[in-house]
């Protein structure tokens, strides 16, 4: 096909552009999140970086949502909340830590979160500089299939529209405002996503919050309404309930975490209620407004729920508007997602898109994987994305992780399955840790014994899923997994036992 030939010519024609112009680059990446900066670095590693021929444009902070307003800051707070809960349980381990009540400093927790984010953001900047990637701070917009206009910000702003972009290691151009037009051999769009706000939800960023603003709180709310029982909502429910907040989750679907295995849904719902979280499912909120400094939600039934703060966590929207896609002729879907193939190429040869803006799997590690695929293809390789073995992690209490198909999903595909389950209550390591809540479930094709999926809820589930991901990706059988010797005593033995249970042969589970 002509499109494929054009794409191959783009990939193998790197360094053929006008290298005499300081505004010409082999690769321009728009967006510095976990997809964008990874793509930029990989392109540089593969040869596009000689003489700073890779440029990354970011309008805000390097690291994107994940590092600045998502994965990392929330995990920092999860760690603080977990430490607090562990200290409260020291007596269970025969440890005495004084007679006074355990307390916490929320301000110090937030300061620690900020320090972690700043440190890792600096690490990203260092890596980009090491690989000679030119970083420009500003708002990028496509003006064609090979040109990007950047509205410069901060020290990099200039009064001259033909200004040379700032190179790594430089302090910036003259102060002022202006734009610069960059030429590109290839463009990678990695603009990410943003929280969705429904009409009738009077989001003000102070009382009615999204996941962006909740990370800037300086005081713990006495009561918190969480609209949406998905991953983000459940994680914040665990964080704030550990700090003593009375949390209410309202979810439109019949269960929280509606995409997860049903056994996991039931277990987490019970765990939430045990923590004092009120979970209301199958309920629609028609409006939320700020009234007398509080968040007031009106339900479809006419009932109202009043809390100090409300967190709106009902999904994310693609950041595809206002970036000039129409000027370049890039096709988008009905939800604003940029349409790409498995090589991360868009409808326009030479323009690729990665991460949340593609509307695929909205996970940071997927964005990074897509960025690597795009960079290799740009540099003349031929890689394709495979979404069959993507691990998903939820940092609730207990943790949840999964990969591949659940039993129900496999049956929907017409596959007869065999399921093995092993409870952490039967794990010697879990018992010694006093963390026995949860289980490992393995789903195998009954005919071939090939592992189709693994679901884990329990201690360190988000770490244990790595082994299961490799197993699913490698298409090994439950029997092969079970015959792989696991160290004792470890939590990973639970995976081995679950694999044994596929054939009814688990030793330590009745």
Image: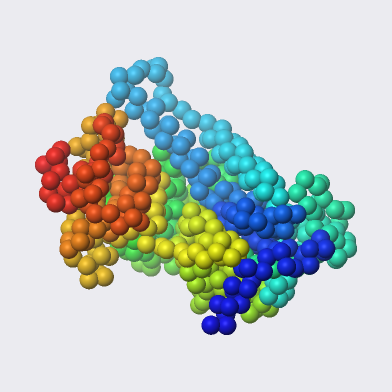
Q: Residue furthest bottom?
A: 2
Q: Position of residue 509 (x, y in %)?
A: 14, 41
At x 23%, y 49%, the residue is 480
Q: Between residues 131 and 280, which one lies in front from this camera angle?
A: 131
x and y percentages locating residue 209 in the rendered image = 54, 54
The answer to whether one can see residue 289 in this image is no
| Residue 483 percent coordinates (x, y) | 21, 44
Q: Quadrant of residue 35?
A: bottom right
Residue at (81% x, 60% y) in the render = 22
Task: Identify which residue, 231 or 339, lies in the foreground.
Answer: 339
Q: Residue at x 30, y 46 (%)?
A: 457
Q: Is residue 127 visible?
A: yes
Screen quadrant of the C terminus: top left
> Which residue occupies 77% across, 45% down?
169
Identify the image quadrant of residue 437: top left
Does 248 sit left or right of 263 as displayed? right
Quick check: 113 above or below 59? above
Tell me where residue 231 sits by quadrant.
Answer: bottom left
């Amino acid at each position: 096909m002509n499109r494929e030939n054009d794409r191959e010519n783009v990939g193998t024609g790197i360094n053929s552009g006008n290298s005499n112009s300081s505004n010409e680059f082999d690769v321009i990446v728009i967006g510095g999140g976990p997809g964008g900066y990874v793509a930029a670095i990989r392109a540089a590693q593969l040869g596009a970086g000689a003489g700073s021929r890779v440029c990354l444009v970011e309008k805000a902070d390097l690291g994107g949502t994940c590092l600045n307003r998502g994965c990392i800051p929330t995990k920092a707070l999860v760690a603080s909340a977990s430490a607090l809960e562990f200290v409260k349980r020291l007596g269970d381990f025969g440890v005495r830590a004084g007679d006074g009540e355990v307390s916490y400093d929320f301000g110090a927790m937030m300061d620690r979160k900020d320090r972690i984010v700043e440190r890792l953001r600096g690490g990203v900047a260092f890596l980009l500089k090491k690989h000679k990637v030119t970083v420009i701070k500003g708002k990028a917009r496509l003006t064609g299939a090979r040109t990007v206009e950047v509205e410069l910000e901060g020290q990099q702003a200039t009064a001259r529209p033909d200004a040379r972009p700032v190179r790594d290691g430089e302090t910036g151009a003259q102060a002022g405002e202006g734009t610069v037009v960059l030429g590109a051999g290839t463009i990678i769009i990695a603009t990410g996503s943003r929280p969705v706000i429904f009409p009738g939800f009077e989001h003000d960023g102070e009382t009615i919050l999204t996941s962006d603003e909740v990370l800037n709180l300086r005081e713990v709310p006495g009561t918190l309404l969480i609209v949406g029982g998905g991953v983000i909502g459940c994680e914040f429910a665990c964080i704030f309930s550990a700090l003593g907040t009375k949390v209410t989750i309202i979810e439109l679907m019949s269960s929280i975490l509606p995409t997860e295995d049903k056994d996991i849904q039931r277990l987490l719902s019970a765990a939430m209620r045990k923590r004092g979280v009120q979970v209301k499912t199958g309920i629609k909120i028609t409006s939320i407004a700020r009234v007398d400094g509080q968040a007031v939600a009106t339900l479809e039934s006419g009932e109202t729920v009043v809390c100090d703060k409300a967190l709106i966590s009902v999904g994310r929207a693609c950041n595809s508007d206002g970036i000039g896609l129409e000027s370049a002729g890039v096709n988008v879907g009905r939800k604003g997602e940029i349409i790409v193939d498995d090589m991360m190429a868009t409808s326009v040869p030479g323009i690729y898109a990665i991460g949340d803006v593609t509307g695929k799997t909205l996970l940071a590690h997927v964005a990074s994987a897509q960025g690597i695929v795009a960079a290799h293809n740009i540099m003349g390789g031929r890689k394709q994305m495979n979404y069959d073995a993507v691990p998903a992690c939820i940092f609730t209490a207990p943790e949840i992780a999964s990969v591949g198909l659940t039993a129900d999903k496999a049956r929907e595909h017409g596959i007869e399955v065999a399921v093995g389950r092993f409870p952490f209550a039967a794990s010697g390591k879990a018992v010694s840790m006093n963390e026995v809540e949860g289980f490992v479930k393995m789903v195998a094709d009954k005919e071939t014994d090939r592992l189709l999926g693994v679901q884990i809820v329990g201690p360190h589930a988000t770490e244990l899923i790595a082994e299961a991901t490799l197993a699913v990706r490698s298409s090994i059988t439950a029997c092969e997994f079970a015959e792989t010797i696991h160290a004792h005593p470890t939590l990973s033995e639970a995976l081995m036992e679950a694999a044994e249970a596929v054939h009814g042969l688990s030793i330590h589970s009745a």
